[in-house]
Image (tube, rainbow, N blue to C red):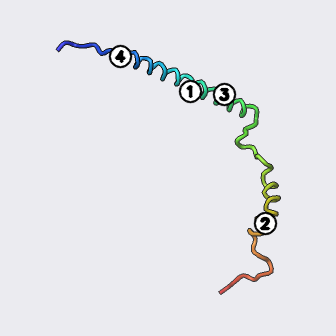
Amino acid sequence: MSPTKKRQTMAKVARERELKERRALKQEKKDARRAAAAERTADGVDESLAPTDGGDDALDAATGGADEQLSRPPEDVAPNVD
């Protein structure tokens, strides 16, 4: 048998080129996101960790402080001892 040279079709070459271009664009976007995140943390403000609406004060206002009442047993009731 004589050695044969395998040829790539033009369609395959085009697909590979498009794939490389898409990967390059994806990497550029990824680098831009990382740079923006690094810039936010360098400024001392990390939005993912900052409270969004006032924290516990907003929760107390919405529940009327009910969560504190539920966490403590009633004071006027004697505990059940069997």
| 58 or 76: nearer the viewer | 58
| Residue at the extreme front of the image, as rendered | 11
The residue tagged 4 is 8
77 with respect to 82 (left or right): right
Gap in Å between the C-alphas at discs 3 and 4?
39 Å
Mark identifier at residue 66: 2
Residue 38: image x %, image y %? Answer: 68, 31
Q: Amino acid at mark 1?
A: Lys
Looking at the rendered image, the disc whose residue lies closer to the viewer, 4 or 2, is 4
Mark identifier at residue 35: 3
Gap in Å between the C-alphas at discs 3 and 2?
44 Å
* Crowd band around label 4 with a 10 angstrom C-alpha radius: few (<14), some (14–19), many (20+): few
Q: Are marks 2 and 1 in contact (CB under 8 Å)?
A: no
Looking at the rendered image, the disc whose residue lies closer to the viewer, 3 or 2, is 2
Looking at the rendered image, the disc whose residue lies closer to the viewer, 3 or 4, is 4
Picture layout, residue 27 above or below residue 47: above
Residue 67: image x %, image y %? Answer: 76, 65
Residue 73: image x %, image y %? Answer: 75, 74
Identify the residue at horizontal 28%, vertical 13% (top origin).
5
The residue tagged 1 is 26
25 with respect to 38 (left or right): left
Q: Amino acid at mark 4?
A: Gln
Task: Give the mark nearer the N terminus: 3 vs 1.
Answer: 1
Gap in Å between the C-alphas at discs 3 and 1?
14 Å
